[in-house]
Image (cartoon, rainbow, N blue to C red):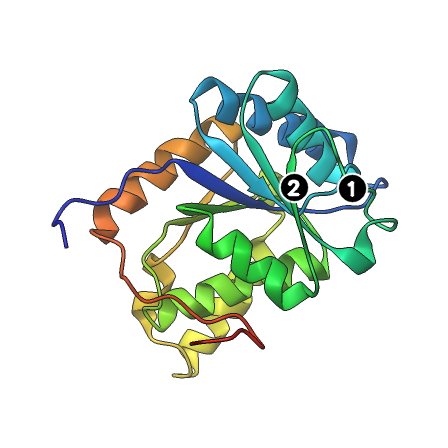
Amino acid sequence: MSDLPAPIGSVCVYCASSEAADPAYMEAAAAFGKTLAAEGLRLVYGGGDIGLMGACARAAHDAGGKVLGVMPDFLRQREILYDDVETIVVGSMHERKMVMFEQSDAFVVLPGGVGTLEEAVEMLSWRRLEVHRKPIVFHSPGGFWDPLYALFQHTVDHNLTPAAFMDTWRSVETVGEILPALRDLAAANGPLLETRMPAVGSDQR
């Protein structure tokens, strides 16, 4: 294995699918999609055409960027599949998260609800277990994610999470800070681990 960090080529974005999201969050998601396209980075996301998900994907696609959507079949109508981009349709949420994990070199968490939170915490848990060393950055405009960070610190204070966990991710306020933070973390993390988690129900022959 090389001692150099793996270059970031694909960035997974977790974010809200709600159309009722603050317009400022929608604009920021679109701005990040454009940034990924301008940097030649592929967007990997949940496959929908609504909410922050749709704003980010449409902006990346319209700017000439590569986009991969990953959508469970049962959500095709609810999240409105964005079929202008390459899409993998899977059978479950577990498969969706696994494909997104395996197709990505880094993770960005934009504002979102319980689904976004669940995805982000799973990646942080896997990072804590050293399943991977892929960088994770939260975009927290106006302190959006501060209550979550306080909860993390609460678990550290009660000796349930090691203090070093707080250094395994970054938080930024502006879209322009996201990619530099990802790259700084990638350099600090070193080479990615080879460990890959099997998909639930997969044939491991």
Q: Is residue 195 above or below residue 110?
A: below
Estimate the x, y position of residue 91 in percent, counting from the top left: 70, 63
Mark 2 residue element: strand
Up/down of 150 relative to 8, above or below: below
Q: Residues within 10 Å of mark 2 (few under 14, many from 20)?
A: some
Q: What residue appears at the point 51 percent right and 75 percent down from the top-left corner?
A: 203
Which residue is situated farthest in the front direction here? 205
Residue 48 shows in this picture: yes
In this rendering, the count of numbered labels is 2
Q: Which residue in the rendered view is the most extreme toward the left?
A: 3
Residue 130 numbered tag: none
Amino acid type at mark 2: Thr
Secondary structure, mark 1, is loop
Rendered location of residue 152, percent (x, y): 49, 68
The residue that mark 2 highlights is 87
10 Å crowding of disc 1: few (<14), some (14-19), many (20+): many
> Residue at image x 69%, y 43%?
47
Residue at x-position 54% and y-position 56% = 99
| Sequence-wise first label, 1 or 2 | 1
Using residue 185 as the reference point, say whether residue 50 is left or right of it.
Answer: right
Residue at the disc numbered 1: 81
Name which residue lies at 34% across and 61% down.
Answer: 132
Asked if disc 1 and disc 2 are in contact, CB closer than 8 Å, the reply is yes
